[in-house]
Image: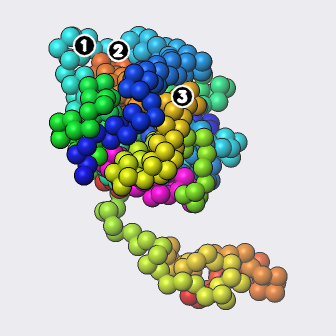
Amino acid sequence: MFTTNPFTPLTTFVSPEVMQGYIVLLMLAVLIGTGFDLLHDGKARFFLQDRQRARAAANRPIGSMDLAAIAAKTLVTDIATFGEFCNRSRRISHVLMFYGFVLYLITTLVMVFGYPSEPHPPMLLPLLWNVGVLLALIGGYWFFFLLRVNVVHDGQPPWRLVRADLFIVTLLGSLTFALLFEWAAMLGSATATKVFAGLYLLFTTLLCVSVPWSKFAHMFYKPVVAFQKRLEEADGSSSLPTPTAPRGERCPHSHT
Amino acid sequence: MPTFTYMTRCDGCGECVDICPSDIMHIDSIYRRSYNIEPNFCWECYSCVKACPQHAIDVRGYADFAPLGHSVRVLREEASGTISWKIRYRDGREKAFTFPIRTTPWGSIKPPAEYAAPDAAALSSPLLAHEPAVLKVDALPTLPSPLEGEGSGERGTNKAATP
């Protein structure tokens, strides 16, 4: 249990080549969607203009070593541990979702491209796939029902969905039906396997083709903004006052 | 001088929604970022600007006294108890100020929840809840009622007991 390739049952419906082609198409959809999102409402232009403004206002030179240190700090603090969030619960839920999704994505790619029709790949792969899905689902459902800002601060009920929920809903749908599809296949129910496989593919397709309308691309934008913010603090172009505390105070205790 | 949000910096935490005394900072339904739903009703209290942990909210000055190119940014640091301002003029000059957030110790002010709830009779009093005791005075001066002030022309003193 949980040690067999979850994608092997799919090979009874489609060939491994089709599965691989489908994944390539989904990745292309994410790339094209992100590019479209960057261009059509001027995000790329805004980023470049802001960078030019910051360069013009800079009063301290930044060397390549400083740049590397800023990049490393951004990687460790803002990307790997989601240091941007001051609210502890939001931060933990994003960490769970991010690492869960990355684990799920990598193991999916390895199993679909490396062991497409092999029911028993190295045991670690399906195990990590399940761990990834579960982590992302725990973080995702926690965020969806308890932490979404319109639920907590605007007092809206959790089932009220708006366009901003497109990403989280399709992500949760995709991962939930992935797990149900795996369980149905393990239990040997052909009908349930077909139904859940169909829903899994539907939500996964929606997740990837809805990038221009969803918040999918914020995973790519946030690190860029975090890097730019740290760079502005370092080169003196930031319009914010200099912190009085020696290392600044990123999160007031009342917000954690 | 209404507030606006830098969408790329906002992480949609909702601190501004909670603190806005006009209830005009809301979360938009497309990107789940904060925005000012009614700039005309913003009284520029800077509460959201100071509360935003991402420094994603700024105030746009009216062009007649705050020409384009200036900036007024604020940084509130709870740990050191300071609030700092940086003013950048359009000609490049900069001024920086730092003040204590408050002049009394943290926790020394009794929060509203710790006061006894006023009874319904207080609704007919001209005083606000817990006045005058909360203002640390014995009585508040008020305009005399027509009967009380007749002939004397003096200002009355409201000695209504507060609940």
Q: Is residue B163 magenta?
A: no
Label 2 residue SS: loop
Question: Pointer 2 indicates a residue of which chain?
Answer: A
Q: What is the distance, in whole Å, between disc 2 and disc 1 at their CAs?
A: 9 Å
Q: Are marks 3 and 1 in contact (CB under 8 Å)?
A: no
Q: Give the labeled residue for mark 1.
A: A62
Q: Give the labeled residue for mark 3.
A: A209
Question: Pointer 1 indicates a residue of which chain?
Answer: A
Q: Is residue A145 magenta?
A: yes
Per the rendered image, the range of residues in magenta is: A133-155
Q: Is residue A40 above or below residue B57?
A: above
Q: What is the distance, in whole Å, between disc 3 and disc 2 at their CAs?
A: 40 Å
Q: Position of residue A123 (x, y in %)?
A: 17, 41
Q: Give the labeled residue for mark 2.
A: A58
Q: Earlier in the sequence, mark 3 or mark 1?
A: 1
Residue drawn 66% across the image and 44% down it: B37
